[in-house]
Image (cartoon, helix red, strand yellow):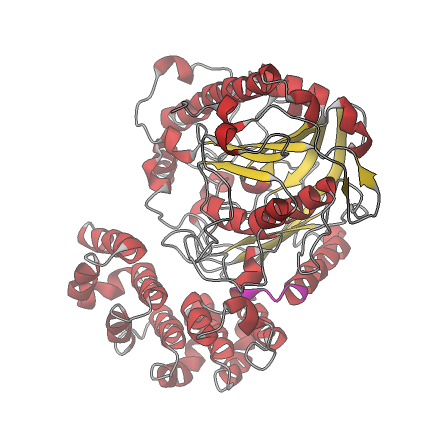
Amino acid sequence: MMKCSALSCLLAFVVFPAATTVFGTPEPERPNILWITSEDNGPFLGCYGDKFANTPNLDKLASEGILYENAIANAPVCAPARSTIITGLYASSMGTQHMRSQNPVPQKIRFYPQYLREAGYFCSNHKKTDYNIAAVPKRMWDSAKDAYNSREPGQPFFCIFNLGTSHESSLHSSKVVPEYLEADFELPPYHPDTPEIRSNWVNYYKIITKLDKQIGKILEDLEKAGLADDTIVFYYADHGGILPRSKRFLYDTGVHVPMIVRFPEKYQHLAPGKPGTRTDRLVSFVDLAPTVLSLVGIKIPQQMQGEAFLGPQQTKPRQYVYMFRGRMDERYDMMRGVRDGRYKYIRNYLPHRIWGQHLNYLWRMPATRSWQQAYKDGKCNEIQSAFWKTKPTEELFDLKADPWEVNNLADSPKHQEILRRMRAANRRHLLETRDTGFLPEGEMIARAGDDTIYEMVRDPERYPLERIMNAAELAGCRDPRNVDKLIGLMKDDDAAVRFWAATGCAALGKPAAGATDALTSLLKDPSPNVRIAAAEALCTIGRPGEAVPVLAELLNHSNSAVALQAINTLDNIGPQARPVIKAMKAARGKSGYVSRAATHAVSQLENE
């Protein structure tokens, strides 16, 4: 059997018979398309102006292609980002934004390889298929390896190589190499200068150099196979990363990715510029599927929410790109963001959650543990300490003046017009895409029932989004003057509105004491997520007596998303959870994320 390699993915191109495209014009040949993706890295490349990078192969690729200066991942973590890429729809529009959620989508949502295969393309995917979606079609890909022997002579290909070299796990080693600490490298202002952090940073550049060599080998194999002249090559990273405060967050360190597209001479008419061109056009992952279909002459399905940025069906350049963050592994949070060419707006719908919520996988990195310890030891300045504190409701950054996004301009009088514009763009997008994030995960799954979440949220009777969103926005304001309004919303007939009303009291804490009676009534609410939110609010007010047993009971709920919400809340209330530590210890025996969160919560209580 032939050994699988880059060469085994690529079949020597033979002229494909003329085909009529959706545009009615004959094309003598259709391009091969090769995607090279890397994991967890921002634009740490020489061609992006990074003076510490040693990336000759990618720099050469950029000199031969188009470099996108504003390519943005819609999600700052892999599976939800791929969910968006494979469908051309925002994962937050389908209920697949929570990490490893595996919710189904309706059959009418087809994945871009299905369209390519129907048009005669051989589709080969090497290694990665985690799309955060249940029941992915078995025949979506023709091959995961050895595509060389499987493709028909003359058949054009679409091939993906996914390289995990730069994945977050590459920095899990606790070894600190002394020579790395002496490197001439200026840390981001939010990172304290510890040996572990400096070592992780500089070692990461060495990993990027290793990645660059692997990409060079794939491109060399393409050339040796005689395919380079017939293949459009894309390179991009699956999201940003990987040092703390990048991956999983909506800052540019988490969502700004390198993207280079090289067109061979025969397909230069499809390129937006000459080789070596740099473009500031805003593009995002939701645009990749429609762009590929546009390049090969397949009509873009109307249901796709992305916009083609290449080929005959390309649209005018975007004004904004949009980002979302939901549950990251075992920790709940909700952020939405919008970015133009200069400014970034982030809305924090759970501002009472700190950025640095403990997350098992992230804490395997020495830099994360070192940063937290420096904060506990009082060695962090104001900027470095912010990560371990609660969030503002809104964030606004001038990316040109403040590329590390540490100077929040949301309260700046000079930037109020920009703030209003970006806030309105975010709200408009959430309404247009029917964003599912305003339902707690457990409620979202339960409310969908036998339908998909995508279908459920498009029924205004089942998902009155604007009304729920209004409650969420009010809750996130953390304004004591809104307590009476929140009490009124606790009587709403929609569980999601009641959830946000109780969450608003949890975010306020003691200033919401006037809502105690209303919150106590919600401890018997039909919705378990409402009961959890009410219980947390009562604990933050200082009335844990009736609330904590409710949380312990819900640890055994049949919906694992509900159980996870309950253990997250028990972890958040700290010592107040001690009376139910026995139930928390039992939860450590559950599977997956519930076990992770319970293990941490128990450890915190036992080590106080």
Magenta span: 432-436
Query: Visible in this render: residue 341?
Result: no
Q: On the rendered structure, is 203 left or right of 33?
A: left
In percent of width and height, residue 237 lies at 55, 35
In percent of width and height, residue 362 lies at 37, 41
In percent of width and height, residue 25 lies at 84, 43
Whether residue 434 is in magenta: the answer is yes
Q: How many marks?
A: 0
Viewer-proximal residue among 43 and 552:
43
Viewer-proximal residue among 312 and 91:
312
On screen, residue 576 above or below 405: below
Q: On the rendered structure, is 605 left or right of 119?
A: left
User: At x 42% / y 74%, what residue is drawn?
Assistant: 446
Viewer-proximal residue among 59 and 534:
59
User: At x 23% / y 53%, what residue is drawn?
Assistant: 599
User: At x 36% / y 76%, what residue is drawn?
Assistant: 528
Whether residue 495 is in magenta: the answer is no
Query: Visible in this render: residue 443?
Result: yes
On screen, residue 54 above or below 568: above
Q: Quadrant of the N terminus?
A: top left
